[in-house]
Image (cartoon, coloured by chain):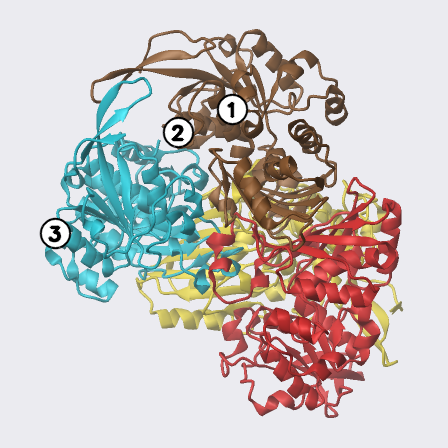
Chain colours: A red, B brown, C yellow, D cyan
Amino acid sequence: MERLDGNSKEGSLYTVHVNTGIQELIFMIKVGIIGGSGLTGRELIRIILRHAKASISYVTSRHYAGTKVSAVFPEFASMYDGSFIDPSDPKVFSGVDAVFVCLPHTEAMEFVNNANGRGIRVIDLSADYRIKDAKVYETWYKQPHKYPELLKRAVYGMPEINREAIRKADIVANTGCYANCTMLGVLPALSKFKVESIISDAKSGVSGAGIKAKDSSMYININENDTPYSVGRRHRHVPEIEEVLESATGKRVPLIMTPQLVPVDHGMLATIYMKLKEPVSLEDIKTAYAEFYNGEPFIRMQDVISMHNVVNTNFCDIKVEDSGYGDTLLVVSTLDNLIKGASGNAVQNMNIMFGFDEKEGFK
Amino acid sequence: MERLDGNSKEGSLYTVHVNTGIQELIFMIKVGIIGGSGLTGRELIRIILRHAKASISYVTSRHYAGTKVSAVFPEFASMYDGSFIDPSDPKVFSGVDAVFVCLPHTEAMEFVNNANGRGIRVIDLSADYRIKDAKVYETWYKQPHKYPELLKRAVYGMPEINREAIRKADIVANTGCYANCTMLGVLPALSKFKVESIISDAKSGVSGAGIKAKDSSMYININENDTPYSVGRRHRHVPEIEEVLESATGKRVPLIMTPQLVPVDHGMLATIYMKLKEPVSLEDIKTAYAEFYNGEPFIRMQDVISMHNVVNTNFCDIKVEDSGYGDTLLVVSTLDNLIKGASGNAVQNMNIMFGFDEKEGFK
Amino acid sequence: MERLDGNSKEGSLYTVHVNTGIQELIFMIKVGIIGGSGLTGRELIRIILRHAKASISYVTSRHYAGTKVSAVFPEFASMYDGSFIDPSDPKVFSGVDAVFVCLPHTEAMEFVNNANGRGIRVIDLSADYRIKDAKVYETWYKQPHKYPELLKRAVYGMPEINREAIRKADIVANTGCYANCTMLGVLPALSKFKVESIISDAKSGVSGAGIKAKDSSMYININENDTPYSVGRRHRHVPEIEEVLESATGKRVPLIMTPQLVPVDHGMLATIYMKLKEPVSLEDIKTAYAEFYNGEPFIRMQDVISMHNVVNTNFCDIKVEDSGYGDTLLVVSTLDNLIKGASGNAVQNMNIMFGFDEKEGFK
Amino acid sequence: MERLDGNSKEGSLYTVHVNTGIQELIFMIKVGIIGGSGLTGRELIRIILRHAKASISYVTSRHYAGTKVSAVFPEFASMYDGSFIDPSDPKVFSGVDAVFVCLPHTEAMEFVNNANGRGIRVIDLSADYRIKDAKVYETWYKQPHKYPELLKRAVYGMPEINREAIRKADIVANTGCYANCTMLGVLPALSKFKVESIISDAKSGVSGAGIKAKDSSMYININENDTPYSVGRRHRHVPEIEEVLESATGKRVPLIMTPQLVPVDHGMLATIYMKLKEPVSLEDIKTAYAEFYNGEPFIRMQDVISMHNVVNTNFCDIKVEDSGYGDTLLVVSTLDNLIKGASGNAVQNMNIMFGFDEKEGFK
């Protein structure tokens, strides 16, 4: 591969010497991964390494700056030769078309502002630009939002409802994992039927709890257990879901969510109960879901639901079940919490932003 | 230990030579375990071996008749020396005060009738005598009930609501595991508040699926997964729960249950959502639960819920959570599906039937 | 993609309309998967779907003939639209460049003969063509080998020692999983030092035990356990390893192997102890390993060994450890039992046979 | 129960009012648990609560002093009402017959000296009094031993070789878990045959790594993995094993040990390879093991080995396997790392010290 042209917001041009001797011009972009020593960063590296139209320009880590990425994540030995760079490195804001931000809340807010100021398109995996209402943000994240103007311009990164806006966005606020799994499970119903309330009993793999050692993520606590936490309305994805659903469907529906850690590495499965104002037949519900997701590259209506079918993929599999009562809708939704629930969805957003095939990187 | 006296419905008398040389007369009983080569049988053996007032007279198994119990369950090596006997062995109906029936549905029905005809008190772990309405039984178990008279006399073996009836019962129909976990989680609310509907999202360890090899219990299918099955109103414990709750509280409340296999051996945890007609304060709910279970030896209202705290015990731990909405009650209930959900509860029933300390065998 | 030319032993020619409008001729092959409803078949489908130079012509299954592959393996929904065909279907021997044989022992033997007779190159994942000595084969597999001539021509499919022979082979006998993990761990030592004996304590994920329900693969037996089986010299991979090592290094070294099922889905890790005639320094051993595997695309000498780094990849990671004794060599070797231990290695063999980049399908 | 008499080194006398009205004098002791907020402390509480001849006087914890034990370990709710006390509490050295010391190395050394000075019998679960050679201790634990005289008097707490010495001991140094599992697997062979070298490939449940949060005990690192660490001669139990085996059998045999964390909570299983100077028949080996352990209450020679048969018990199950070579002995040994590998063995030691039935507490 030989580079022909510098990067721009519109990407870069490369010559590809294919083995038949024919040359070809393809559009490729370079991306940076900010705060890449955690689990979402690791997953981004894995996906971008497989991406035909994007390459990794750098990965930052304050803690591991100067260390080879493959020394921290030995799975990348012989696959990726780069070293982590410090986030203060000038390289961070030069020569990249897009950055993925995997920083903690607050820190991300600042970085996104900086990147945006330099004309770099941002996919933010933190929660800092997800909630449009700055007051709600402040209530849940215990800090005022410093960039309310940017917040307004940021697009919520859920392709299934925001595809066109994402295409043109400078800042995409990638969905939270519980949020994505729950919302994908309820959106078609909310759009078509009168939903009075939602209960999402959401089981997550432990990778959702991050890479840092803590009591609640210890093997001896997780193994042979099922651990509900932040139940009811206490999880930060609750206001995110409520706002997004309202914005997408015009309806504010009360939500109870029961996040749970199950003894699983990657994966999430939500059993979702929706109370309807009027009974609807199972057939009508199934039709509504099939129509809503018609053409979506990563949503599959399945007869059999298993985390195994979505783990390590960007798919979300959904099944409408018979609750036994016409006025209660029972839906099961499953995805990989680190892929369609985080880094995979982020790359899908990138694909949309740069006009790539949405499936690129997931083939 | 030297036997002084034959068995009777009232038990047997033994002389105990304690190591101080003092003799003591204690009341002991002998029990048989019918169909004891499965997981509930194994658990019964384990508990009875620790019981100070009951000893195992025999364990039957058609398949393993003549084989040492410890050859099939090597954990009992040097603890229990007996061999399985065939269910046709005359010993089955002689010299025992009580039998635990661990046969499949239908077979249990017949055996219970026989044992009852010979004056032996029965604790039936099958579903054959749980549902009082013979028509409902026939609908769910695809066969008519042959002994409707016995069915009427059988007592549902849930000490928390039927203690006095169990004390005098000849036939006790031990609770189902999902049923017990769900009912213990909702009973205080149903007794005191106006509950409109119940959703029980119930996660079970795989031992609940039995000892026989089948695809759905294979390691590769269960591991790294969460597997809902027979959701809505499709699980056989649904009619059992509805009938028992109605009989105990006078109210028929619609129930949706989502049984799930989680990658856990022993253990069950249900997150339960109850819709109330009128909002109730969290404090009032907590008080109602504390009062309802006051004095119960095996129900603990806990601030922290973990399967780990109940596994290998006869406890059911319950927590009332804040759902975020006054009209929706969120309760988490956990127990060991093979103990308080099956064999432990059965021994608790036996303890009540014979006037023993209810905690005997679980100390 | 539009086909220009029929298949041949040398592959097929296709026109690719890339999105720049440029046309390109690339060499592509079509493959069949025989007996593809098991775990190795599933893994082959997954890998070939990602392969740029090979496409799946068909997948056979006696049991599922006529059923969509994605109905049996719903993970392939929206990815692969084909249905299983019966092995007697005439399509099986027409229009394919190569077949992967995932049949049980004996059945594979027959099929390989048929395919070979029709000029189709074969990668056999069964054990039928691994052991060159027909008498040894008969001893271990309890049947005479019907095609001793083919057996002689078949090449043992271990690229690290047989790359050139594989390139030209008509029949490649793919390695067994325990065999590959152990042999990759010992080969450099055997080639360079005087090894007197080998002990391989090999822990395998349960997927190695296949897709069929059986007691020994039940969740309740595997979970929270470590299960040695066929220890000492009782596993069928023992004679395979001994013969291959002898053929590669000229030395017959006694082997004790302790296969174990650990509560893991995919993955295998062997701790290997080699007794040396003369002490060797740790540095010399490390150098020997690095040199032996220099340039190998899938063997990585790592400082940190974890199944996690190789699962879902075709890598085998190896570490030479300090045993504390100069005359005992301690090596840890890990791979994915279904990939580098089976289907991945099979595709690597295919890549070599057809002149593709060995990494194709694994990028 | 009414106390008649104060404690003494010889225990206490109680009156027991049994339900028949007969009184009985039984010998009971009171014990303290020092550093009881970890996993071995928790297990000791569990066992002592079931013990008919010992009761818990107190449990210390610097961190949790003043907090109810059942608030830290909710499994003890309604079973144990006490609160943790500070180790400086005067109660620590008064009114107890024995203390179990679960302090970290170094701290234990000091405490044991203090307790011993006050005439309290000590079972030390730390490593501080295990290694008799103070120089070896200093090499491995990076500190000089402050009480070499006590070290000499301390008895290594392995009932199977030191029963008589334990009976009279003031200080018992309880075995390490890897040490116990390995030694129980090799002792009969060492006593009877000429063993040249030992390799112990020892898989441990993660509870062996303690209760504190750390990277290496995180669910995401342990799950779906097998993690060797401190291999060769790097684990601290290696010098312990070598010294004890030499002291018991008069032979110094080189040992290689491969400790591994497997995705299991409780449990340990070692596959052990012993090189013999001269071949011995399998029958002779089996006989030697059966004779050596004849009468041992907790050692079972089993035909089937499974962690499941020993978890939550004080048993160690052992099987002699056919290695395929007469000069290599292959033994599998399994126990619960927290019970026979730690707290259960400690209570067995206590039972011996106070003349109780060794099985008391484990029935």
**In the rendered structure, which amino acid carries the disc numbered 3?**
Gly
Q: CA distance from mark 3 to mark 1?
A: 51 Å
| Percent position of residue C241, x then y | 50, 52
Q: Which mark is residue B77?
A: 2
**In the rendered structure, which amino acid carries the disc numbered 1?**
Asn
| Percent position of residue B241, x then y | 67, 32
Q: Kindly indicate the quadrant of the structure image that contains residue A207.
A: bottom right
The residue indicated by pointer 3 is D117
Q: Residue at x 78, y 78 (%)?
A: A353
Relative to A60, is A261 above or below? above
Give the secondary structure at mark 2.
loop
Q: Does C201 sit left or right of A79 as displayed?
A: left
Point out the image quarter for the C terminus of chain B: top left
* Number of numbered markers: 3
In front here: B112 or C329?
B112
Q: Which mark is residue B349?
A: 1
Q: Residues within 10 Å of mark 3 (few under 14, many from 20)?
A: few
Callout 2: chain = B
Q: Nearer the viewer, mark 2 or mark 1?
A: 1
Q: CA distance from mark 3 to mark 2?
A: 42 Å
Residue C172 can be seen in this image: no
| Percent position of residue C206, x then y | 57, 48
In front here: B39 or C122?
B39
Q: Residues within 10 Å of mark 2 (few under 14, many from 20)?
A: some
